[in-house]
Amino acid sequence: FQAEDGIRDQPRSRGLGDVYKRQKIMSELIYLGIGSNIGDRETNIFSSIAALDVREEVVVVRTASIYETDPLYNLDQPKFLNTVVEIKTDLDPEVMLQVCQGVELMLGRPINHQKNDPRVIDIDILAYETKSIDINNLKIPHPDLIARKFVLVPWEEIAPNFMVQDFGRTVSELLKICPDTSNVKNYKLEKTA
């Protein structure tokens, strides 16, 4: 079906089920890191992905497996579940940050949270395909991704050859030189759809 505005209705398969969604051709590939270590960690991660995917201007393309990881920096907290999600959108980085923060708030993350504290959900913009940005509260690509195995392992699973802006290396190359020696293991899901 071709609408008057030239946008074609297309069926697409989504990570959370088959759903039809009227979509524009999205111009920018983006990778998000998602983690949780409080409450029902699996549900928190799946709920955040679903909350992103229901937005008209965001299309979840694929998700990595979920990995269980030891906390870094603040070690006195529960283990994390982490994944990386590939999306397409035409949202600018600042607006995408607001979308991610809105999902975090919706799932119960406090506005005033401390860095490296336990969290219900954490959504980080890791990289845009063609953009880099450095402003007060947003740096893309994420400056710490090179030192975070819990980001690079799931990211390599879905996009090993993605060239990370500013680092000049692929995800696989970054993982090979990552100094992080923490344990990152594939997590066996406790829930099924």
Image: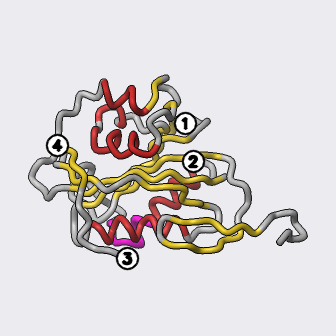
Amino acid type at image mark 1 = Ile
| Cα distance between the residues tagged 4 and 1 | 31 Å
What is the crowding at mark 2: few (fewer than 14 residues within 10 Å), some, or many (at least 20)?
many
| Cα distance between the residues tagged 4 and 2 | 31 Å
Question: Disc 3 or 4, which lies upstream in sequence?
Answer: 4
Please report the residue visible at 49 percent of the width from the left and 55 percent of the height from the top: 62
* Residue 173: image location, x then y, percent: 39, 26
| Magenta-tinted stretch | 103-109
Image side of residue 51 versus residue 172, left or right = right
Please report the residue visible at 33 percent of the width from the left and 31 percent of the height from the top: 175
Name the outermost residue toward the right: 4
What is the crowding at mark 4: few (fewer than 14 residues within 10 Å), some, or many (at least 20)?
few
Report which residue position mark 3 lands on: 193
Q: Quadrant of the C terminus?
A: bottom left
| Cα distance between the residues tagged 1 and 3 | 38 Å
Report which residue position mark 2 lands on: 93
Which tag is nearer the camera, tag 3 or tag 2?
A: 3
Mark 4: secondary structure: loop
Report which residue position mark 1 lands on: 133
Image side of residue 57 versus residue 143, left or right = right
Amino acid type at image mark 2 = Pro
Judging depth in this view, the residue of 162 and 148 nearest the camera is 162
